[in-house]
Image (cartoon, rainbow, N blue to C red):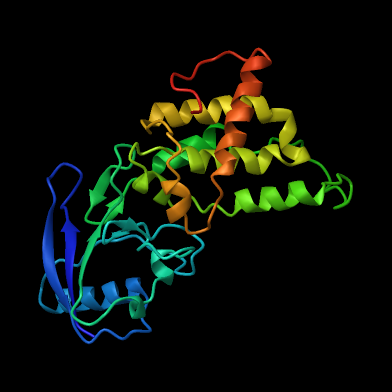
């Protein structure tokens, strides 16, 4: 198939960007979207032009770096699918496809389709971990975990931190990401000793990074490639409220809502 691509090109963070039009010829329907971009880049390089910059790593739907908005929808709009898992058979011959980066103040564009998502790293550094004493590894059954809690923790841990939730939210909110990371640890015995400090610190880091407030439109859940449930946001609000009720100092400006 032959396709027309309208791709966002931006030299660096300081220069304004614009759309450029390219032709993707003889695209095989079994290619992934990223493989199609690889072929387009090969043609550009052969013509002496600058290739399109985009992020990718695992190409197996695990790492979350393939952060592209395709025809206005993060990851292309197919349920439970990252861009690297999006196959060209989803498109049709002669179609025009618009490709652009995440659009959020907290995710500044570095070049073309590449965004700086270190804001997520700062949120994780603020509390997305469990502090443990060094020593021998305990037996697996030393800390019994109810299956319902274990299943919920695994559902939250499925979040790959791609940022699609932020890109689709009209407020550029990171609540689904933060909620998944807070819930993942709060549900397990190992994460309970630090649960109040974790919730406060991660929400504070989210506010300081410049993400918007959550108005619970559900757009984040709709585009999440791992289908992380919106219900985790309610859990985050409960964790945040619990921390405040226990007398922890309130240093966050926006709260978890």
Q: Residue at x 38, y 62 (%)?
A: 77
* Residue at image coords 33%, 45%: 116
Q: Is residue 136 left or right of residue 31?
A: right
> Residue 8, relative to residue 84: is it above or below?
above
Residue 237 placement (x, y as % from top left): 57, 29
- Asked if residue 253 can be seen in this view, the reply is yes
Q: Which is more toward the observer, 240 or 216? A: 216
Q: Can you say whether 106 is above or below 45 in the image?
A: above
Residue 37 image point, x, y percent? 27, 72
Place of residue 187 in the rendered image (x, y in percent of width and height, measured from the top left): 71, 40
Q: Toward the viewer: 41 or 188?
A: 188
Near-viewer residue (222 or 52):
222
Q: Quadrant of the N terminus?
A: bottom left
Q: Hey, which quadrant is residue 95 in on the image?
A: bottom left
In the image, 90: left or right of 52?
A: right
* In this rendering, position of residue 81 left or right of residue 52: right
Q: Position of residue 153 (x, y in %)?
A: 68, 48
């Amino acid at each position: 198939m032959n396709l027309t691509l309208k791709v966002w090109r931006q030299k660096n963070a300081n220069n304004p960007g614009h759309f450029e039009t390219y032709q993707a010829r003889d695209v095989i329907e079994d290619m992934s979207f990223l493989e199609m971009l690889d072929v387009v880049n090969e043609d550009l390089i052969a013509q002496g032009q600058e290739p399109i910059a985009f992020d990718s790593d695992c190409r197996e739907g695990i790492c979350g770096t393939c952060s592209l908005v395709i025809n206005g929808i993060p990851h292309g709009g197919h349920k439970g699918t990252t861009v690297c898992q999006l196959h060209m058979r989803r498109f049709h011959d002669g179609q025009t496809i618009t490709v652009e980066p995440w659009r959020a103040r907290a995710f500044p564009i570095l070049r073309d389709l590449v965004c700086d998502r270190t804001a997520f790293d700062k949120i994780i550094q603020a509390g997305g971990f469990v502090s443990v004493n060094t020593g021998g590894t305990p037996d697996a059954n030393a800390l019994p975990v109810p299956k319902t809690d274990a299943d919920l923790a695994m559902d939250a841990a499925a979040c790959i931190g791609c940022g699609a939730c932020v890109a689709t939210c009209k407020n550029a909110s990171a609540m689904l990401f933060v909620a998944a990371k807070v819930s993942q640890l709060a549900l397990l015995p190992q994460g309970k000793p630090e649960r109040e400090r974790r919730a406060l610190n991660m929400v504070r880091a989210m506010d300081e990074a410049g993400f918007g407030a959550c108005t619970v439109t559900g757009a984040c859940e709709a585009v999440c490639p791992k289908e992380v449930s919106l219900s985790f946001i309610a859990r985050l609000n409960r964790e945040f409220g619990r921390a405040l009720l226990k007398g922890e100092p309130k240093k966050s400006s926006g709260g978890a809502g």
